[in-house]
């Protein structure tokens, strides 16, 4: 990782604190003190501000982030389980904007392909994860662990450090305090930004990007695992061992991120980075089949709209 970019991290941390305060005031003013604020969009803006001194985002990047966010927000805005068709359509709509992020980040063809796939698919999946899990307060924590994984994976860490710093305040307000969530659109925006940061940070050791994108882990696989679990129940109906969140989710996600960042991410060769990253994501998907939000404790019920509670 080289010398720790403490200045960039502190810039991000300060911007993240301001973003959390603004989100809290806006959320309470709109919905009352019982509703936790959605911090993802403001956290993304804070990260961009903190990144600006080391690499100013170009208009192409800003348009790409806005477009991916808008496309991914379509299925994220649905409280009921989104159909496969709507999710695929959202990915297709996000892909051209993800391409703008890719062409800014690198001139290498396969790197651009990874950025497009990671930003489009990852943003849509993360948006759905917040719809289904955001009321638990876990999504900001999953995101900060992913941001830490990106920082640990890429060789150029200035932008990754700023992103990590900006994501810390939201995570502290998430779980176990249950005072914040990313929001569907915010999760999508933050994920697209993270993929761009990973691509920029991987310059000079491009295979690190594969491991960094795999650090999305459960942030991307939880809604897919839930959909697969419902499909299996309808057709096979085997006895399933179901694990309630939140601690197992965090443990599995941390393991996936650790493998993706410190095995695949530090590799100089695609023949190592690709299979390790694929294995990490497959493991995350398998774990997602048995993970569900814990609706028994009621500790985070104030984050949950009545119509949004998972079945």
Image (tube, rainbow, N blue to C red):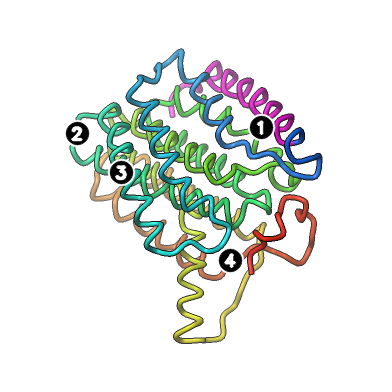
Crowd rating for badge 3 (residues with CA inside 10 Å; few <14, some 14–19, many 20+)? many
Q: Residue at x 47, y 33 (%)?
A: 151
Per the image, label 2 sits on a secondary structure element best described as loop
Q: Is residue 240 left or right of residue 211?
A: right
Image coords of residue 97 (percent x, y): 32, 36
What secondary structure characterizes most of the magenta part?
Answer: helix
Per the image, label 3 sits on a secondary structure element best described as helix
**Spatial CA span between label 4 and label 3:** 29 Å
**Spatial CA span between label 2 and label 3:** 17 Å
Q: Are marks 4 and 3 in contact (CB under 8 Å)?
A: no
Q: Earlier in the sequence, mark 1 or mark 4?
A: 1
Image coords of residue 28 (percent x, y): 76, 35
Q: Quadrant of the C terminus?
A: bottom right
Q: Earlier in the sequence, mark 2 or mark 3?
A: 3
Per the image, label 1 sits on a secondary structure element best described as helix
- Tell which of 242 and 276 is nearer to you: 242
What label does residue 95 carry, if any?
Answer: 3
Q: Earlier in the sequence, mark 4 or mark 2?
A: 2
Query: According to the image, label 2 marks what residue?
Result: 108
Q: Nearer the viewer, mark 4 or mark 3?
A: 3
Q: Nearer the viewer, mark 2 or mark 3?
A: 3
Query: According to the image, label 1 marks what residue?
Result: 169
Q: Which residues are magenta?
A: 1-27
Q: Earlier in the sequence, mark 3 or mark 1?
A: 3
Q: Are marks 2 and 3 in contact (CB under 8 Å)?
A: no
Compared to residue 58, the image places residue 247 above or below, namely below
Per the image, label 4 sits on a secondary structure element best described as strand
Query: According to the image, label 4 marks what residue?
Result: 291
- Tell which of 11 and 211 is nearer to you: 11
**Spatial CA span between label 4 and label 2:** 37 Å
């Amino acid at each position: 990782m080289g010398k720790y970019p403490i200045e960039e991290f502190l810039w991000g941390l300060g911007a993240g604190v301001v973003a959390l305060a603004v989100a809290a005031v806006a959320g309470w003013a709109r919905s009352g003190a019982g509703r936790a604020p959605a911090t993802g969009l403001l956290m993304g803006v804070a990260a961009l501000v903190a990144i600006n001194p080391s690499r100013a985002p170009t208009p192409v990047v800003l348009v790409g982030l806005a477009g991916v966010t808008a496309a991914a927000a379509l299925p994220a805005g649905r409280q009921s389980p989104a159909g496969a068709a709507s999710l695929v359509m959202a990915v297709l709509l996000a892909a051209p904007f993800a391409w703008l992020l890719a062409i800014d980040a690198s001139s290498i063809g396969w790197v651009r392909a990874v950025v497009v796939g990671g930003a489009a698919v990852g943003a849509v999946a993360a948006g759905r994860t917040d719809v289904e899990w955001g009321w638990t307060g876990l999504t900001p924590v999953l995101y900060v662990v992913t941001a830490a994984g990106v920082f640990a994976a890429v060789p150029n860490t200035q932008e990754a450090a700023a992103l990590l710093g900006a994501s810390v305040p939201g995570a502290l307000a998430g779980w176990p305090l249950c005072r914040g969530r990313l929001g569907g659109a915010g999760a999508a925006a933050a994920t697209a930004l993270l993929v761009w940061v990973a691509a920029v940070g991987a310059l000079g050791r491009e295979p690190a990007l594969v491991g960094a994108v795999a650090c999305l882990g459960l942030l991307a696989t939880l809604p897919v695992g839930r959909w697969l679990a419902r499909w299996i129940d309808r057709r096979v109906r085997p006895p399933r061992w179901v694990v309630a969140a939140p601690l197992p989710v965090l443990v599995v996600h941390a393991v996936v991120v650790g493998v993706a960042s410190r095995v695949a991410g530090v590799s100089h060769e695609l023949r190592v980075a690709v299979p390790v990253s694929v294995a990490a994501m497959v493991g995350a998907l398998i774990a997602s089949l048995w993970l569900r939000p814990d609706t028994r404790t009621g500790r985070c019920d104030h984050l949950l709209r009545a119509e949004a509670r998972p079945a």
